[in-house]
Amino acid sequence: MAVENPEDISPRENTSSEGKQNLFRILRKEMKGDSGFIVVEILGNKHYIEVKRDRKKVILSLGARKGIPLSSVELLLEQDQFAGLDRGTKSKVLKEIKANVYELINATLPSPVIFRNSFLNAKVYFYEDGLVRIYYKGRKYAETTVGDEEDLKLKLLDVAREEGLDDVKAAEEVRKFLEEVVASIKPFTTKVVIGDTEIRYADGRRMKAALVEGSEAYFTIWVWGEFTNEEDVRVVGAKPIFFKSDGAVAEVVESVPAAAPAEVIFLPLELIRNCVLTVNEFNELWKEVGRINKGEAEPPTWRGVFEAIMSKIREYVGAEEIIYKVASLFIIYTYFYDLINHATYTIPVGESGSGKRNLSTFIGALTRSYTVTDPSEASLARIINTIGGVAIIDETIIDEFMRRFLNAGSQKNTPITRCNKDDPTKIEVIDPFGPKVIVCQPKDLAELPQDTRNRSIPLSMVRWKGVFKREVERGEVWSIIKDLYLLMLYRWGEFKKTYEELDPVVSKIFGGHDRDKWLIILTVAYLVGEDVFKDVLTYAVGEYRKREGVSEDVQYVINGILRALSTYLVSIEFKDDWGLLKSGGGDKRSDEFKLVEKIVEEVNGSELLDKSLFALTAKGVIVANEGEYDTEIHRSLATKIGKILRKGELPFVVDFDREGKERKRLFKVDINKLTTYINNYELEVPADLDFALIKKHLKIDLESLVFDPEKILKSVLQNGKSVRSVQSVRHEPHEFVSKERLNDKENVKTTQADTSDTLDTSKGSGETISTVSVSVVRPQDVYRFLVSKFNGSCLSYDEVVGSVAKEFNVGREEASRAVDDCVELGLVDRVEEGGVVKLCIQD
């Protein structure tokens, strides 16, 4: 497609302020697809050069010279209008033309804007490549570079003068504007000069979906509509709107402190529909933001959004309850993915007709997603590098490039580079980071790269009877999508802080990629509620255990060894009481003694305390696990266990031999090596071991390897640092923030979006925002307070509730609920003494 001549290019005389003609000057250049143009000024005369890219060739046209290859660029000037140029001048002009043509064809995408602001009635754009453009009165008014600060000042002064300011006021406006620029963009202010070489700062920071800067976060929300650009031209496409949020107030801003897309992107709406909001949707979202900012409404809660998704997903997908929960948590997470450095994937996997595509379609409809149908399309790179979001991928298109895309996409700052197929000298960069949904059949799951499977959460789908909707209509889920955006804008701090707090706890359970992916989902689950957290944690550990490279038989053997070891240590600890145990006499421990006696007959612990060597028979493993040994039932099992211990090449089995009068075959186990094996494979140990005795005699802590959701949850609540931002935020009307906060926010203005089909976010209402945050009492905070004040004491229930109500300035009903939660979670013990309920507080 040829690019039309943008302006009259008839020759005209143009001189500099000194009266000298410019030898060569670029007035404008633009490239769309494979066609573009350069408007140049040569010795004061204006010329239009057409540029076309035809595979590896670049074709130029100027005046009567048409279809000239770039390699023969000198032919462009072999025309009558350039007859007056001497050889040296032609050489310089041709060199400039070639340099600008190369720059044009290698700039498929515009350089990202790193700062954008208004100067009086002009718009000033600072680009990552150092270019500065000033748009004024509906046109591009001037262009300069970051490096030429004096030229920028002069151009801004010209704008101020055209606005009617005198030189003194104009200079003051320029000074204030440049101070804001200096505070906002490092490339403008930081440079090192070495000889004739100037090196400018460039940190390469880019923003797609979100960026955290101190106590504030910036978010990109893409809007599809008709926009009026700086040159007063109406264009249709997707444009980024930037929000800044501190968790209490969300506002539209012109710029973000990093390189970010700023121009309208021309992509088919059907390709990016889920990634963008229409003008009407944005207006509705923006009105709700205004209500929350003013205290007229509260931001959505984690629980509320989660339950809304759970309710809606049942209409479209048939699956187990845990699949609903994990999918719903994944949907919520996708709105926060750019706040952390790694991403997770889900894999709906099942046979034909299992509903896996229904699930992926539902996830896609509620997230900012795009469907990957052809990984070779250039539009894929355009979407990923600018809009980002959730990639919905069908397993049928996974080729070598897509494998790289999936492997690199879970870690931030791991771009994929490849050569342009039409021009091998040009390097293309794709940023694959972000959550993904991979639709897969069981037979194809094994074909996925191992790293990709490890980074993904499988959602196993089976055929489910029922009537389910097929197509997810945008209108039916819009209210949920709107709440997801609001959750992102107002509760991003809660997500980030909780993620950081849970990291050390989850890292004790999972390792490697499992830690990364489940930490993300468990973060959202914890914010939704403890019940969801426990359910998902149990599911996560179950999935984790399935993947471990230890068979059920080996796990059975290890469990038996540990139980036999624990029982043997019990026999040592209570050897003085054996007479009492053996006689029975109504003692409750007589049954325990019988089991101890059976196991002791099958073990030899003579080297245990000195060398950590423990010997036992295959029968001993069975007795320890089953509590008995039946020859008819267990003979074949004993034979299998014997083979595993003798031929299984288990590193902790160091020897075996026959001992005693009965010549029993005993297998010698190195307990230290067994512990290392358990740790390396991250195996779960039985919960019925006497961990205290094992730690006392062998100095080994096995209790930490027991999976107990209740215990882990208690650890999260009890040992986690204070997370104020995890508490719910309530916005009350007619109240104001602190005086200091108000001073910081006094210049914040809301922007009311136009309700017409054309969106213009420059229109402001001049309305000042004021809010107040109120914390809601949570069990972990109550527990910390009680321990700090009453540790080691038992108090009446009413006394505890009264203290909590007074400390947190809440009513007794809310205080009572918080105390009941502490009891239910096991943080506080509830006892009855003489018919009086008391609560015992112990750190």
Image (cartoon, grey):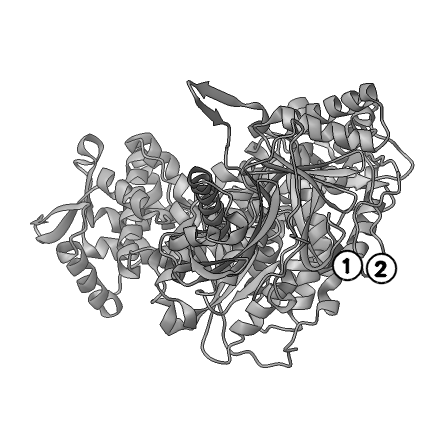
Residue 650: x percent and y percent? 19, 51
Residue 647 versus residue 77: which sits nearer the camera?
A: 77
Find the distance from the CA under tag 2 to the CA under tag 1.
Answer: 8 Å
Residue 38: x percent and y percent? 56, 50
Looking at the image, residue 590 sits to the left or right of residue 129; the answer is left
Question: Does residue 132 lie above or below 410 as drawn?
Answer: above
Q: Which of the two discs, 2 and 1, labels the residue nearer the N terminus?
A: 1
Of the numbered discs in the image, which one, if any, rests on residue 340?
none
Residue at horizontal 19 percent and vertical 63 percent from the top? 640
Quarter containing the C terminus:
top right
Q: Residues within 10 Å of mark 2 (few under 14, many from 20)?
A: few
Of the numbered discs in the image, which one, if any, rests on residue 279?
1
Which amino acid, by three-letter code, is at mark 2? Ser
Which amino acid, by three-letter code, is at mark 1? Val
Q: Residues within 10 Å of mark 1 (few under 14, many from 20)?
A: many
Mark 2: secondary structure: loop
Question: Does residue 74 lie above or below 245 as drawn?
Answer: below
